[in-house]
Image (spheres, coloured by chain):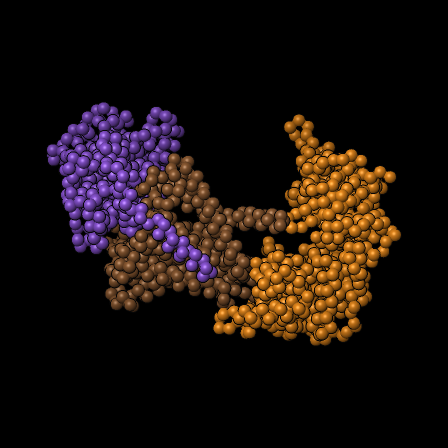
Chain colours: A orange, B brown, C purple
Amino acid sequence: MDYIVEMLNIRKEFPGIVANDDISVNLKKGEIHALLGENGAGKSTLMSILFGLYKPDKGQIKVNGQVVNINNPNQANDLGIGMVHQHFKLVHNFTITENIILGLEPKSGLFLNLKEASEKIRKLSEKYKLNVDPDALIENVSVGMQQRAEILKMLYRNAEVLIFDEPTAVLTPQEILELIKIMRNLTEEGKSILLITHKLKEIKTVADRCTVIRRGKMIGTVDVKDTSTADMAEMMVGRVVSFNVDKKEQEAGEIVLDVKDLSVLGSHGVRTLKNFSFSVRSGEIVGIGGVDGNGQTELVEAITGLKKIESGSILLESKDISDYSIRKRITSGMAHIPEDRHKHGLVLDYSLEENMVLEVYNRSPYAKNMFLNKSEIRKHADKIIDDFDVRSGEGPVTITRSMSGGNQQKAIVGREVDHNPNLLIAVQPTRGLDVGSIEYIHKRLIEQRDSGKAVLLVSLELDEILDLSDRIVIIAGGEKVGTVNASETNENEVGLMMAGVGKGDTP
Amino acid sequence: MKIKINKQLYIGLISVLLGLIAGAILMAFTGNNPFLGYSYLFRGGLMNIERIGNTLATATPLIFTGLSVAFAFKTGLFNIGASGQMLFGGLCATAVALTFNIPRELLLPLMMMAAILGGGFWALIPGLLKAKFNVHEVVSTIMMNWIAYWTIYYSVPAFFKGEFLETESRSIPEFASLKAEWLTNLFNGSFINYGLFLAIASVVIIAIILNKTVLGFELKAAGYNRFGAEYAGMRVDTNIVLSMVIAGALAGLGGATYYVGYASNIQIGVLPTLGFDGIAAALLGGLNPYGVMAASIFFGIFHSGKGFMNAMTSIPPEIGDTIIATIIYFAATSVLIERAMAIVSKKVKGEN
Amino acid sequence: MKRVIVILLAIMFVANFAFAGGEQEATSSDSLKVGMVTDAGTIDDKSFNQGTWEGILEAEKDMDITTKYLKPVGTTEADYLKEIGNLYDAGYRFMVTPGFKFETTIFQAQDKYPDCKFVLIDGAPHNADYSVFNTAANTVAIFFAEHESGFLAGVASALQIKEGEMGFIGGMEIPPVQKFNWGFQQGVAYANENFDTKIVLNAENIIYQGTFSDVAAGQQLAAQMYDKGVSVIFAAAGGVGVGAINEAKSRAKSGEEVWIVGVDVDQYADGLFDGKKSIILTSAMKRIDTSAYDMIKAELGGSFPGGETLIFDASNNGVSIPAKNPNLDSSVESSVGDVFDMIKSGSIVVAAEQGSLIK
């Protein structure tokens, strides 16, 4: 069988790192080919080469059997290669049609011929069952439709090969199902798809073949239907991975965090969190599930004190802390693993040991009469490094900027857990981490729960929420949709609730 | 820590070297011998004890403004208002000197205290504006420069006017000057004064604050990552104000050394350029207090040697300024030098 | 960190020895070395610095001298003294310093360098608290009768324009600038009385900007005055005047009839636009160049009037309007010539004080 795209022995080096080392990927016509690898394995680099954003140091690319040189995305488009980026490249106050024709506007004389374009788009939409309204403004349509507009953009440009870069990251489970259907439609109509992802489940459902990359090296290409998820995971990580989170049954204790009727204004003065109530007890993990941007950030910022509340109350062990300063909340027994470890979690230009005392530097024994006690700070860092297996080039004096994401996160988790908090708030604690680190951090969170701490987990990864939580609070549009017990629910139910479909509250 | 300082030292030295090379090209281009030019330049700054004294005296206020800018920078603030803080601090010191008739041992500390408070106050306003209303300090400090300028313009003739001239204050009496006879004589009649010792003390104190204290830890954290500092429970807004006040106090003290040490009156209608030169000294010094001191002394050599070079050669005075500007340019773009160094060192390692 | 300081000190001391001993080679030729230290502003300030320097260059053309100017880092006495020291160490033994800001500097320098001659323009040497005035035997102090110059420009402008409003923009409110202003007002009044012109000077149009350097402010002030109906502005303001000139030029280009009266030197060329026409009506000149030239000439001729304070006024042609004024009618020029002679002879006395004048 002929290949539509062949990438042969591709090598790409960046200063200090070999991003792609002798990687070959062949895409058959009409197949969905997954590219699997952990973050930083080299998937994006490889696709950027195909899309003309980087030039390979070695190797060649063939399209329809012909050797080609792709120097920029326009050339890639001309060759029928299109990319649906993870972060959409759309103009918000333009209609879908206007967005799609951007760059190749159809003209009659001096004027835009929007009608003709809009008609063509409508036909394309029908043919591939994309269900897109060409005249809708981007800012008024759902994330899912925005993504479909991106797909249409490629089809409008007669793309034969579509690259999807982590397409499900922004979607609800139901939207993911939609997308999978669309991808199948596309292949049935003869298009070929390259799917970049680190989610094994999706690959198992939709892909025909899968090429696995680990640390810039190609591990192999397999037929998806003959390979188990566990095998693919092992190829990806390089060792046997356990998916099961061991969690013993445990009765939850006293209420530690009690949020009542909490409302918060967002950045534009719009109320982004509305009358939100829930509680977390000692010895349980409560997960907040929801699609990105539905008020989770505001909820966490309000609880941790980064943002002022508009109304409602936040009780920590029966004390109203809504007027407390951040520092007072910390000393009252709250710890916070922040969503953005670079923005909030770390001072990247500080050394590891300095970061480890970021919240306690002014307390004995780390400070003495206004001066820092460097030997105590060092001891403290050494302890966290040992306890949490934080690896870095120079130990405590490593500048944290130079550390890997996994180790940065382990350090933050270590620091927060070391405060021995009554309430641990973990927001996206495993975002962008490799499977090994994810496993480790999950274990630590469970440990906290098992030792009787209250844990609030906010995550966009539904699997993470389902695996770790005892109870799940679902948030949509800044409002609580409902609460479910993790043991009594499933992905489908939670997914529906995330889309805003309500359900009676289970206590 | 050691490695970092050395790297910054190298970057500074490379900046200077590139600047000197660029200057040499300029000199050659205007038909002059660069080696001769530079030899006169350095002779002008260093060839006898009086000139060394003058070099140090020129460097003194620059150390303060450089330190002020560097300190603010370290804490994430860009203080372009060192000139205004200098002016107002200098006015306060001058006012005390011209108002109180008390023994020198009491008067001098009082004057310095006034300068510190004055400069600090002048920076307090932009600090508060930034903390409360998020007004960018670049804008507000520049505005404060001009407010200081006009404050001096009207208050000096109104309250401290000389007998005949309205463009400068009365000269401060000798016993209120930071100049000391023994020091002047030691340096053969130069303008060196106690300000130098104050400057050195400030450098040491600021270095200790930044590197060894709880306060320094907080301020730097806010400078590197405001959000991180906020997250960790630090009072970032208070720290912004405090940091500006300390930066202003430094500049204010620098103003005192300038107006009641180096000079002996305060002129109206002159916004001292030292506040802006301080930015250069801070950058060339890699924001390290000791580095700032070294950079200031280096600029001091330039400023005092430039005239002699011009007098001895046909190099136009503007070339001297251009060379300094070039060095500043290379210092400001030290990131490029850093990157170039990384590439070079990688190549060297690769070949081994 | 200590190492940095040690290295630095080491460099300084090595440099000290390596570069020392250069002092004796300073003087090479026998011709008189004439140096100048500039005041605040650049050498091409179209005013004081430039006038002085042009006089020195003129002397260089006619006489056997070498010349050099130095630009100090700041405007303090220390900065000025350092540059004088630089010139002295380089063998310069005749120095011209423009501006009253050099008064205390020269007071010190004349004693420190007794074998060097100093010409102080627009000032007299004195100590810091004005308790001692002393123009030493190696120094000449020079003053100008700015009020007479302003008077002449006032008469000339009034005669040419005949009817309308005029204004004044000054730099800093200091005696030389004030004297220009007061003289100008007297000149306008004189023309109104004796030549039947109808020129109005409103108090709101007599303004001191406060600096000699703020070009933008000068442009703004001029624009405001022109908008209010002023047709002639006397700008005695250095860089601020440059702004006023720019404003006048752009207005003239679009057909408005606006004028500037220049100051210190003949500014006609600075006001040129569209190649041929200039918005400079005339200029109130101080013959700074002449004074510098004359002093150099006197020194070479052995008649340097050391210790004296000289006043350059109409009687010795030290102040005037330019010889050629393309924007003035010849009848106006001849009338001004008559007025000039009357000042010379003393039949017109221009007051150098404010009296009842505006500001």
Task: Judge whether A438 appears above or below C185 on screen.
Answer: below
Q: Is residue B204 visible?
A: yes
Q: Position of residue A50 (x, y in %)?
A: 73, 41
Q: Is residue A345 left or right of residue B172?
A: right
Q: Position of residue A377 (x, y in %)?
A: 57, 69
Q: Is residue C276 left or right of residue A291?
A: left
Instruction: Please report the residue visible at 61 percent of the width from the left and 68 percent of the height from the top.
Output: A381
Foreground residue among A193 and A439: A439
Foreground residue among A479 and A488: A488
**Count of number-bearing discs:** 0
Q: Position of residue A403 (x, y in %)?
A: 64, 58
Residue reaching furthest right? A226
Instruction: Please report the residue visible at 41 percent of the width from the left and 37 percent of the height from the top.
Output: B28
Foreground residue among B66 and B246: B66
Q: Quadrant of the C terminus of chain A?
A: bottom right
Q: Is residue A483 visible?
A: no
Q: Is residue C260 left or right of residue A276?
A: left
Task: Judge whether C78 appears above or below B30 on screen.
Answer: below
Residue A238 placement: quadrant: bottom right
Task: Judge whether C27 appears above or below C164 on screen.
Answer: below
Instruction: Please report the residue visible at 48 percent of the width from the left and 48 percent of the height from the top.
Output: B15
Q: Is residue A45 left or right of residue C190?
A: right
Q: Quadrant of the N terminus of chain A?
A: top right
Q: Position of residue C195 (x, y in %)?
A: 19, 30
Instruction: Please report the residue visible at 54 percent of the width from the left and 65 percent of the height from the top.
Output: B234
Residue A188 placement: quadrant: top right
